[in-house]
Image (spheres, helix red, strand yellow):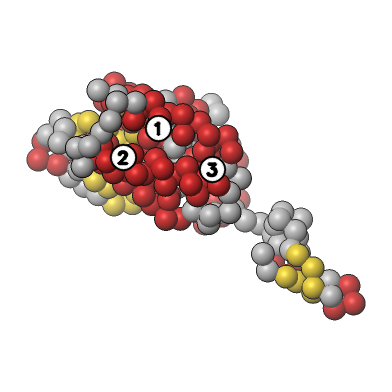
Amino acid sequence: MQSIEGKRGQPRTRPPFPATSGLWGQPSNINNVETYANVPQILLKGGEWFASMGTEKSKGTKTFAIAGKVKRTGLIEVPLGVTIREIIYDVGGGILDDKAFKAVQTGGPMGGCIPEKYLDMPVDYESLASVGSIMGSGGFVVMDEDTCMVDIARFFLEFVQEESCGKCVPCRVGTRQMYDILNRICAGEGRPGDIETLETLSDYVKAGSLCGLGQGAPNPVLSTIEHFRD
């Protein structure tokens, strides 16, 4: 933590709540750029206009970075409440090489993998949470029939493991142990009980991590186990 000058020139630790004491020790907004980008249009057109888009609980639009095995990749903006199918097939043009859809991973590295049976599910905060994923940063990674789900779980867990600050043991050590197990499975060296161990480790990491990184790290692994256990 950085120090800021307190009374009589003595350094003191910056409080952890930016809304109370952030930049230069003053109350600071820490909303992301996407949130700020909505403000001018709401001021110009009013709250009712903004609330007319989206669902009952998830209002407005959402920006997604659609990537992976889809014909049209890029940054898109859609009203909340559109279905996964509409995003992939209407906006994204369908699966690359017209292969079968397998899953989509939403929310960035701490999101979950959503299988085909949820293609017609509306994309909003509540619906994504109900199937083990999140809205998060707006990641939208599409996978086709040839995608290895174990490899996908390993890929996202590797990112989280590298990003861990190392302050708390459940995140620093737990995600490493999970990554090592997935690495073995991908190398064809899986052992009986590996899946159950991953589930147990996931519970410990989620419950014991101090910040959202560790708390959300097991999501890709748990959702993959839930929907693609075989």
Local secondary structure at mark 2: helix
Q: Circles 1 and 2: CB distance less than 8 Å?
A: yes
Circle 1 residue: 198
Local secondary structure at mark 3: helix
Question: What is the spatial separation of the Cα atoms under label 3 and label 1, in whole angstroms?
Answer: 13 Å
The answer to whether any part of residue 108 appears in the image is no
For residue 9, above or below residue 203: below
Quadrant hosting residue 29: bottom right
Quadrant hosting residue 141: top left
Q: Position of residue 99 (x, y in %)?
A: 12, 34
The answer to whether any part of residue 73 appears in the image is yes
Q: Position of residue 115 (x, y in %)?
A: 29, 27
Local secondary structure at mark 1: helix
For residue 37, above or below residue 185: below
Q: Residue at x 27, y 41 (%)?
A: 184
Q: Residue at x 34, y 44 (%)?
A: 180
Q: Is residue 138 left or right of residue 142?
A: right
Q: Is residue 219 left or right of residue 21?
A: left
